[in-house]
Image: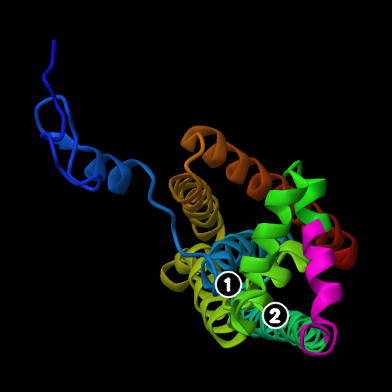
Amino acid sequence: MAAVEKPAAGGEPGDRVRLGRHRPLTDLHQRDHHHRSLQGGGARAAVFGVSDGLVTNVSLILGMAGAHPAAGVVRLAGVAGLVAGAFSMAAGEFVSMRAQKELLQRELALESHELRHRPEGERRELVRIYENRGIEPGLARQLADEMMRTPELALETHAREELGINPSALGQPLQAAVSSFTTFAVGALLPLLPWLVTIGGAAAIGSVVVGAGAALAVGAALAVFTQRSWWRSALRQLAISAVAAAVTYGIGHAVGLSTVG
């Protein structure tokens, strides 16, 4: 049986306790309970950006290729889709996150006003919140008194308990916009690469191959990020990209044939 080391008599509670031969509890916590920082919005924007860039441009390129135009037309459409999509994604992220941040700041300002002018009412409100969560009335009042002791702690507590937000993590719109722009451009560039080196059917097949490989890679990377099944995530991303590309290719082929006729 593996040895278990316990603190010596008189040892401090914070002393290391070892399980087995080499892994202290502090190491277990650091290795097995690490949280990623997702507060700025950049990580979310990056994930959506690369996925949207890939799906959008592989669909656009294959939709154009389905109409059998000149290779330069497909390249132009791919470049236009990359640039327009990247700016659209960045603008959308910035505007939406900025509006959300301003709304949350307004709610925090209202809460701060209430704490300054109606502290007793806010204290009772906090007591009710704790009681509704199953805390005994006496302990709920004690907790509320402790949380209301300083203005900063009171505001943070009411923001978390009433509004469900963290006052120090309202999002970073510019970070999200830059992240979204960059990753969308990367995702959109991948299916365009074959058209920069070849033309016709070979380029279309290249876009399919590159798009499929990129979709699998994006899905697998997302699984690493979320700690979910990598193959499920990869196949889901591939299926989404394939359906979108197939539909737009069919539309492009039909429209192209009817136009020629």
Count the numbered circles shown. Answer: 2
Within-10-Å neighbours for mark 1: few <14, some 14–19, many 20+: many
- Main SS class of the magenta portion in the image: helix
Within-10-Å neighbours for mark 2: few <14, some 14–19, many 20+: many
Residue at 78%, 63% (x, y): give it: 126
At label 2, the amino acid type is: Met
**Label 2, label 1: how far apart the Cα atoms are:** 8 Å
Residue at 68%, 46% (x, y): give it: 240
Say which quadrant the N terminus sits in: top left
The image position of residue 130, as x and y in percent, is: 75, 53
With respect to residue 25, does 165 lie above or below?
below
Mark identifier at residue 41: 1
What stretch of residues is rendered in magenta?
114-127
Mark identifier at residue 97: 2
Contact, mark 2 vs mark 1 (Cβ under 8 Å):
yes
Helix, strand or loop for disc 1? loop
The image position of residue 250, as x and y in percent, is: 78, 51
